[in-house]
């Protein structure tokens, strides 16, 4: 079988890249070791976590907010089996959709482990050991990532779990210990907190979401404490033990004292690592970079001409939309176009409620780089829309260049921030000033008015409603 392009891995990087290759007239195949397409994102990442976040938020509202809205119901009960079954149905529908897109675009799907025989030959071995050889001019490696962990916190997939097992837990944790106050810890911790669990987060850094703007970490800490989270910052986990009926986690606090935490489950969420096992990179002469990543140049090409790598397996944010952009980038490059990705404008979202979202530079980054900036903030509680829905927590903060007024970063915690952030991404892509954003008419009443007000505050301290 001869191809212009073989894509290894069917996550958002791989399958989107394959579709763009096919659209551009390249004969394309995709290789996936699992029976379902879609990778981490569709099977055990973005989609199932959002399905459970939505279900748990409905429960939380029914239990805590309906009465205030004048809706009286008997106390709602959680049916975890049904919640997981609905999540699985959403995942199946989404993964089936990728298979449909492969068929529609006439992309050959080869199920099995893909590995390099040499630079232009990919071997696919299916679950019964049957081998197929694919001859290809170009290969895109899109093999993604796997959960990371450190010595002493090895997941046993029973009580010491990663996000993958946590997404299938058919009971509500009573006392969940989360190692890592990053995105996974806060999102999956939120699912169980809303369903009634006590959630105890042990974080190595001095704040949650240490890479985000400190204003976001601070606001979200307040929000999540109200939801039943306890945060233990500056805690370095030494050991996790499955005691049979629960878990015992030992950590060193800021003063280097040993502290013990007990719970029924421990979620290990300390980042993810690139996945290249079994790829046979050495057979093609592909060089690895630091920390298990595949090294690529500005064209996302490895040291071997014709072999490219995208998504979680290379440097940069481990996000589905970043992987997708890179898939499209390589496809267009192969078709002779001149694509471009603006890595400064990859938005990040944390799907707590309210949500947190950001794009561009944080205040800490601007300070460290010695940039002369100004900042404007606006609290969500001052919005009529927020009071109408009772989602009053949060703020929008805009950072702009002190001289030119160009927007350099937008950071928010707000209901619907995941969607609101796109206004900032668009504005920044067109290098808008804070005044440009402030002068655009925003619909009333919406949460987006907080962005307008923050822009007014940033441009010349003239927010209207505060
Ligand atoms: P992956 O999606 O990891 O796909 C790689 C695929 O390659 C896998 O299917 C794997 O089986 C296959 N593969 C690997 N090796 C081989 C081989 N040798 N042969 C054949 N196939 C192979 N990101 C967001 O942007 N938004 C979110 O809301 C979000 N939520 C997340 C929630 C969780 C719980 C997790 C774990 C992640 C989340 N992410 C989210 C991150 C997102 O899932 C990843 O950034 C994204 O999936 C990376 O895409 P990818 O194409 O690089 O790789
Ligand atoms: P993360 O990098 O977001 O957070 C890991 C956290 O663990 C950090 O705060 C870090 O300081 C802490 N940590 C590291 N070692 C520790 C230790 N020994 N003890 C205590 N704390 C420790 O990684 P996470 O949450 O595992 O997510 C992995 C990736 O998946 C992220 O890169 C993220 O981009 C992606 N993801 C994205 C989502 C989204 O876009 N909404 C949702 C979920 C995951």
Image (tube, rainbow, N blue to C red):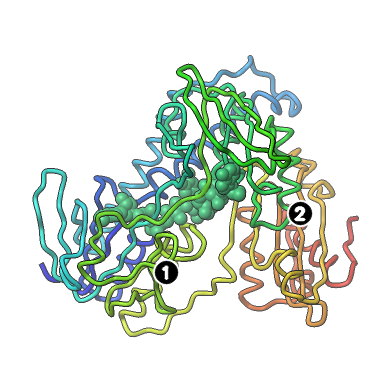
| Mark 1 element type | helix
Other-residue count near label 1 (Cα within 10 Å), few / some / many at <14 / 14–19 / ≥20: many
Give whichever of 459, 13 is nearer the camera.
Answer: 13
Identified at 69% across, 33% down, the residue is: 230
Quadrant of the image containing the N terminus: bottom left
Residue lying at 40% horizontally and 56% vertically, measured from the top left: 274
Identify the disc placed on residue 131: none
In percent of the image, x 48 and y 37: which residue is there?
152
Q: Position of residue 455 (x, y in %)?
A: 79, 66
Q: Quadrant of the C terminus?
A: bottom right
Q: Residues within 10 Å of mark 2 (few under 14, many from 20)?
A: some
Q: Position of residue 183 (x, y in %)?
A: 57, 47
Q: Which residue is mark 2?
A: 215
Of residue 434 and residue 154, the one placed in the foreground of this image is 154
Horizontal relation, residue 121 to residue 145: left or right: left
Q: Secondary structure at mark 2?
A: helix
Q: Judge from the rendering whether residue 342 lies leftward or rightward of residue 207; answer left or right.
A: left
Q: Nearer the viewer, residue 140 or 274?
A: 274
Count of numbered badges drawn on the protein = 2
Residue 374 in sight: yes
Establish if 429 lies above or below 60.
Answer: below
Q: Which of marks 1 and 2 precedes in the sequence?
A: 2
Q: Position of residue 176 (x, y in %)?
A: 57, 28
Q: Quadrant of residue 422?
A: bottom right
Tell me: 144 left or right of 367: left
- Residue 154, how many percent across, how many down? 44, 37
On screen, residue 324 versus residue 366, left or right, reads left
Residue matched to label 1? 326
In the image, residue 309 sits, relative to residue 402, either above or below, namely above
């Amino acid at each position: 079988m001869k191809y212009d392009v073989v894509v290894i891995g069917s996550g958002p990087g791989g399958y989107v890249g394959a579709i763009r290759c096919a659209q551009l007239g390249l004969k394309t195949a995709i290789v996936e070791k699992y029976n379902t397409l879609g990778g981490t994102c569709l099977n055990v990442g973005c989609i199932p976590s959002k399905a459970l976040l939505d279900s748990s938020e409905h429960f939380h509202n029914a239990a805590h907010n309906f009465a205030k809205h004048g809706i009286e119901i008997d106390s709602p009960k959680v049916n975890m089996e049904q919640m997981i079954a609905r999540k699985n149905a959403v995942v199946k529908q989404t993964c089936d959709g990728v298979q449909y897109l492969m068929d529609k675009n006439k992309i050959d799907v080869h199920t099995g482990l893909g590995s390099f025989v040499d630079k232009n030959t990919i071997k696919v071995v299916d679950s019964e050991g049957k081998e197929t050889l694919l001859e290809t001019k170009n290969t895109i490696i899109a093999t993604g990532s796997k959960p990371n962990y450190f010595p002493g916190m090895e997941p046993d997939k029973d009580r010491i779990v990663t996000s993958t097992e946590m997404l299938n837990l058919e009971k509500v944790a009573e006392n969940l210990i989360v190692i890592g106050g990053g995105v996974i810890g806060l999102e999956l911790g939120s699912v169980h907190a809303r369903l009634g669990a006590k959630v105890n987060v042990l974080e190595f850094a001095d704040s949650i979401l240490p890479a985000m703007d400190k204003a976001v970490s601070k606001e979200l800490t307040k929000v999540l404490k109200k939801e039943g989270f306890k945060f233990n910052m500056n805690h370095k986990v030494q050991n996790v033990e499955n005691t049979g009926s629960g878990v015992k986690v030992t950590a060193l606090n800021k003063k280097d004292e040993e502290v013990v935490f007990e719970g029924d489950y421990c979620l290990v969420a300390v980042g993810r690592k690139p996945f290249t096992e079994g790829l046979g990179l050495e057979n093609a002469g592909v060089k690895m970079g630091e920390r298990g990543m595949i090294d690529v140049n500005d064209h996302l090409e490895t040291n071997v001409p014709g072999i490219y790598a995208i998504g979680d397996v290379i440097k940069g944010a481990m996000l589905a939309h970043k992987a997708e952009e890179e898939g499209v980038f390589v496809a267009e490059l192969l078709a002779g176009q001149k694509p471009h990705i603006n890595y400064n404008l990859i938005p990040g979202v944390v799907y707590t409620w309210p949500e947190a979202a950001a794009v561009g530079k944080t205040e800490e980054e601007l300070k460290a780089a010695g940039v002369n900036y100004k900042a404007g903030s606006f609290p969500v509680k001052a919005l009529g829309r927020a009071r109408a829905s009772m989602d009053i927590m949060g703020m929008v903060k805009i950072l702009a260049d002190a001289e030119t007024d160009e927007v350099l970063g937008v950071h928010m915690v707000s209901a619907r921030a995941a969607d609101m952030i796109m206004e900032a991404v668009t504005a920044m892509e067109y290098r808008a000033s804070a005044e440009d954003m402030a002068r655009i008419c925003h619909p009333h009443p919406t949460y987006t008015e907080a962005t307008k007000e923050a822009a007014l505050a940033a441009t010349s301290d003239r927010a209207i409603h505060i």
